[in-house]
Image (cartoon, rainbow, N blue to C red):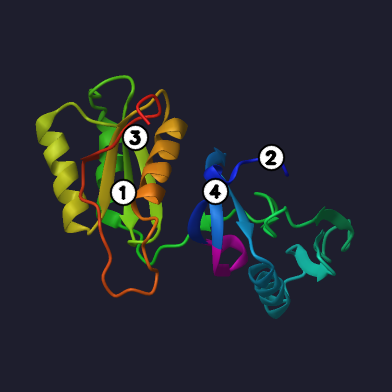
Amino acid sequence: MNRPLSDDDWFTSVVGCQPHRLGPYPAEITAERLNGVPEARFTRTAVDQIARDIIRHANPRHPTLRLNGDVAEIRAPLASPERGQLLARVEPDTNDWYRLGREPWPWTEHTDDDHPRLHALLRDMAHHGYPPAGSQEWTVAFDDHGWRMVVLAIFPTPADESLHSDLWLTLYDSALASYEVTAPDASSAELAARRFFAADRVAADPHSSTQLLAMPSTRIPGPSES
């Protein structure tokens, strides 16, 4: 759960856990995913709020979380055979962040919209198939909040100009953005996208009424070009 990562591997986000009706909470996440789930880390204040929300929901089939001094304790559900036994002790890292792991809470980035038009187009693309622009050409589609990005999909960039145009229009009409990047795989493409966004928005103010937004099909440097 606590593999060492550098600060450059963490990105500003807001996350929730829908199966447990938790969130949203301010957090930092990694681009590295396991079964599609990023790892998240939280401040002590956020961990305390998560623990309070779990108590408020009072579901005996869900694991619990409590702060014992500076240590976050994860315990088995009361309705499970383990009946509240200690599963993990999470101590804060050197920057006072708590890495709660991907289990038992599969965190996802919080967004207010399911973006059905984009996902319908991506399903159609996957169903019918399409020639990619290249084996290492990727599109990272995301919801641009100005100070944080919510990655919605990562897929091979289409070579067909008509399909590429349909994708651009769908993203634009849905107020979404995308980066196009050369990378060896989807994971590397996401990491390049998050690092570019973080550097580009380093001065962004979450409370500002005016935010810089990216356009669809914005070309960014790949890992070998950074």
Q: Are marks 3 and 4 in contact (CB under 8 Å)?
A: no
* Labelled disc at residue 155: 3
- Mark sitting earlier along the chain (3/4): 4
**Which percent across, then down, holds residue 216?**
21, 47
Q: Residue at x 63, y 61 (%)?
A: 42
The amino acid type, in three-letter code, at marker 1 is His
Task: Specify start and end residues of the magenta stretch as a single range.
Answer: 15-26
- Mark sitting earlier along the chain (4/2): 2
Disc 2 secondary structure class? loop
Q: Is residue 17 visible?
A: no
Q: CA distance from mark 3 to mark 2?
A: 28 Å
- Where, quadrant-wise, is the N terminus in this rendering? top right
Residue hosting label 1: 119
The amino acid type, in three-letter code, at marker 3 is Phe
**Which percent across, then down, holds residue 45?**
66, 72
Residue hosting label 2: 4
- Eye-nearest disc, 3 or 4: 4
Residue hosting label 4: 10
Disc 1 secondary structure class? helix
Quick check: 15 left or right of 96? left
Task: Establish if 49 lies above or below 182.
Answer: below
Q: Residue at x 26, y 50 (%)?
A: 177
- Mark sitting earlier along the chain (4/1): 4
- Mark sitting earlier along the chain (2/1): 2
Task: Establish if 209 lies above or below 117.
Answer: below
